[in-house]
Amino acid sequence: MFFFIALTNRQEDLGIQWLECSHCQKKERAHIYLTYQVLILFFIPVFKWNKRYLVKMEDCGSLYEAEDASLEKLHLLKSGDRKKYCPYCLAEIDASYQYCPHCGKEVKERM
């Protein structure tokens, strides 16, 4: 008699929601994923454990972990790259810059 048993990691895409990013301080689209480990017996998932809800912000790329499926409490795992654009020459610049390195004009607002 042969048994086919496997342990593997899986990820499910749970969709997109609008959430407040604590890193950027703005509301943006977030992709929600459920990751878990699963025991497979004869090609049938039998037991799931180590479930984690991960939230990735679309604009800044910050990655959060949620305590449960309600997504009420998010813990920052990795902060994304906050970038902005010069309103005069439209060059991509670092979020910490006060002046555009391309055209030299003062950048007052985040875009």
Image (cartoon, rainbow, N blue to C red):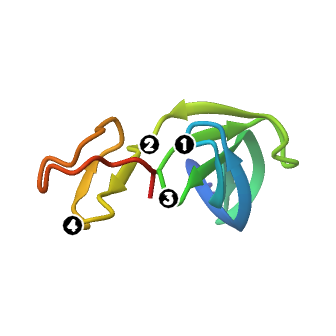
Mark 1 vs mark 4: in front = 4
Q: Secondary structure at mark 4?
A: loop
**Among numbered discs 1 and 4, the one appearing first in the sequence:** 1
- Mark 1 residue element: strand
Q: Are marks 2 and 1 in contact (CB under 8 Å)?
A: yes
| Amino acid tagged 1 | Leu
The residue where tag 3 is placed is 59
Which residue in the protein does label 4 denote?
A: 89
Q: Name the side, left or right, on which 68 lies relative to 64.
A: right
Q: Amino acid at mark 4?
A: Cys
Residue 97 horizontal/vertical position (percent): 28, 38
Inter-mark Cα distance, 3 to 4: 21 Å
- At a point 45% along the width and 51% down the height, the residue shown is 110
- Residue on which the image places disc 1: 63
Of residues 56 and 49, which is closer to you in this image? 56
* Label annotation for residue 80: 2
